């Protein structure tokens, strides 16, 4: 693949100092492409371009109807090019090809959805009294920095770019250094569909070099970040210096509660998917599986049987149900939790095997792991592992289940498996998390809010809530006397 450039002000440019870095195929360890390595000077150019585009009204002055039409064309192109995009994404991120295909479709949905909101979400006219009138007018917040992670590269880019553009903002997208390729494709498509120069810029590079300058710069009005808690804490603090509107979508240690009255098979299957989907590299992974004591032994056995069916292999192989982790570094981190689990006294109930195919010998594969008899105080129950490591924790009754579920610094998601409707609602309401699934795990419909309580983040994405993150509300007060 050709060397990839930065996209700034409608032009494909090298980094100022000409430096590049490699993006790797996690299944083979091979280099896919060399990508421009942006630093502060490049960030400065991108910010200046986005600022100018915004201040000149190159996009915000375009009628919402036309903005929506362009977003729909991007959605259409994502559909049309879904095969190639999915192959690229699968290769860059080590995602199962089928999952990458779904991501592309969801990314397209994102643009369709926000095209609709661009023309339907207006302001309000609250009635202060007979002699006055207030108009509440949503306006674009300005220049937005969009910093995305490597687990759902295109989807996370779409989740931020679509509402930012729908709102009339200009943006600088900084994809994760591990997976920069699909963001560049998105910019290419947007440009080909006629997005004006400077409205969407893409800076590839490393967080501290290409991302940090965006967060520090006073010309940037908003930051939307999805990534680790550690980086999110820094971004939140730095962004506050210049009073940026900030959305942070961070980590989790989401509880998955299995009650004895649940549809057992569905609960086991859903619980396994909840933590093994995309190798557990999902912020909302249900990594703590809480199981009611009366079905505990059977459930652990069934979960292990479920895990034993996973087939690790090349992400493009249709037989594969589990791909590699993103990097050697990340695998080492995930692996360290095997030791923590053992040292803390959890029981290793299942450990799968990695592929033996010599072509995959340099891939970053890691087997699915189930620890049983976990106590919620153990590190494997408290810290986000971001890998295929399940911690199974027994509970006695509903109150205890809720207490364990909430005993975590995080609050992104939770799943509740039960056939008792009242219990489902009771438990859902008692859990301190932004998303609670009842008899399911992991769906994230584009229309509904997504985001965390507590250390899982600040703000909400998706639906009209995600649009609001890119808007300022202005009140225009009319004296009618
Ligand atoms: P992970 O640990 O899963 O790789 P990170 O939180 O490190 O997740 O990365 C998520 C995104 O944040 C990536 O695009 C990364 O380059 C970016 N990033 C990392 N550090 C910083 C930083 N100090 N400032 C801005 N962005 C950063
Ligand atoms: Mg890669």
Image (cartoon, rainbow, N blue to C red):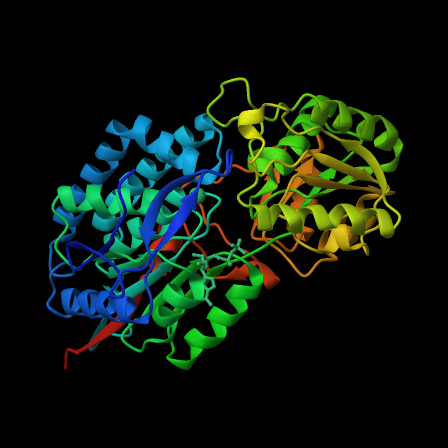
Q: Quick one: which residue is furthest to the top in this view?
A: 319
**Screen quadrant of the C terminus:** bottom left
Place of residue 435 in the rendered image (x, y in percent of width and height, measured from the top left): 56, 47
Give how far across and how far down residue 237 sits, in percent. Answer: 49, 75
Q: Position of residue 21 (x, y in %)?
A: 38, 53
Q: Nearer the viewer, residue 326 or 306?
A: 326
Q: Name the side, left or right, on which 51 lies relative to 392.
A: left
| Rendered position, 185 above or below 452 | above
Q: Is residue 399 visible?
A: no
Where is 127 relative to 381, above or below?
below
Residue drawn at point x = 46 percent, y = 24 percent? 316
Q: Residue at x 83, y 49 (%)?
A: 400
Image-quadrant location for residue 454: bottom right
Residue 396 visible in this rendered orientation of the protein: yes
Q: What residue do we see at 76% from left, 45% from top?
A: 338
Q: Is residue 322 left or right of residue 479?
A: right
Residue 311 falls in which quadrant of the image?
top right
| Picture layout, residue 315 above or below residue 231 | above
Can you say whether 441 is above or below 14 in the image?
above
Q: Residue 123, percent across and down? A: 26, 60
């Amino acid at each position: 693949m050709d060397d990839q450039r930065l996209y700034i002000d409608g032009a494909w440019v090298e980094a100022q100092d000409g430096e590049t870095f490699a993006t790797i195929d996690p299944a083979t360890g091979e280099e896919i492409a060399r990508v421009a390595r942006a630093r502060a000077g490049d960030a400065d150019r991108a910010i200046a371009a986005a600022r100018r585009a915004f201040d000149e009204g190159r996009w915000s002055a375009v009628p919402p109807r036309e903005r929506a039409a362009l977003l729909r064309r991007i959605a259409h192109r994502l559909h049309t090019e879904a095969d190639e995009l999915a192959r690229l994404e699968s290769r860059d991120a080590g995602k199962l090809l089928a999952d990458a295909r779904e991501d592309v479709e969801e990314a397209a949905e994102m643009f369709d959805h926000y095209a609709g909101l661009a023309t339907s979400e207006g302001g309000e006219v609250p009635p202060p009294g007979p002699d006055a009138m207030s108009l509440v007018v949503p306006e674009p917040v300005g220049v937005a920095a969009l910093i995305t992670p490597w687990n759902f590269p295109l989807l996370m880019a779409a989740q931020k770019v679509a509402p930012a553009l729908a709102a009339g903002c200009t943006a600088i997208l900084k994809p994760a250094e591990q997976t920069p390729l699909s963001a560049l494709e998105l910019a290419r498509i947007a440009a080909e569909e006629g997005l004006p120069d400077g409205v969407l810029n893409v800076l590839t590079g490393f967080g501290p070099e290409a991302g940090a300058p965006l967060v520090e710069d006073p010309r940037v009005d908003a930051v939307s970040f999805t990534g680790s808690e550690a980086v999110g804490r820094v971004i939140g603090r730095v962004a506050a210096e210049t009073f940026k509107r900030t959305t942070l979508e961070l980590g989790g240690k989401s509880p998955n509660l299995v009650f004895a009255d649940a549809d057992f098979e569905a609960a086991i299957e859903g619980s396994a998917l909840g933590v093994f989907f995309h190798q557990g590299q999902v912020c909302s992974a249900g990594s703590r599986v809480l199981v009611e004591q009366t079905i505990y032994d059977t459930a652990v056995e069934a979960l292990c049987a479920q895990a034993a069916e996973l087939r690790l292999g090349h992400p493009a192989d249709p037989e594969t149900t589990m791909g590699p982790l993103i990097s050697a570094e990340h695998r080492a981190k995930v692996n360290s939790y095997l030791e923590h689990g053992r040292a803390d006294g959890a029981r290793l109930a299942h450990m799968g095997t990695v592929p033996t195919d010599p072509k995959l010998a340099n891939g970053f594969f890691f087997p699915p792991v189930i620890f049983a008899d976990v106590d919620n105080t153990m590190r494997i129950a408290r810290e986000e592992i971001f890998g295929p490591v399940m911690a199974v924790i027994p509970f006695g009754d509903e109150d205890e289940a809720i207490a364990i579920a909430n005993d975590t610094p995080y609050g992104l998601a939770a799943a509740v498996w039960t056939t008792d409707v009242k219990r489902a609602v009771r438990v859902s309401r008692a859990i301190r998390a932004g998303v609670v699934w009842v008899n399911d795990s992991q769906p994230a419909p584009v229309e509904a809010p997504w985001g965390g309580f507590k250390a899982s983040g600040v703000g909400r994405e998706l639906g009209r809530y995600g649009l609001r993150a890119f808007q300022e509300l202005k009140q225009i007060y009319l004296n009618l006397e």
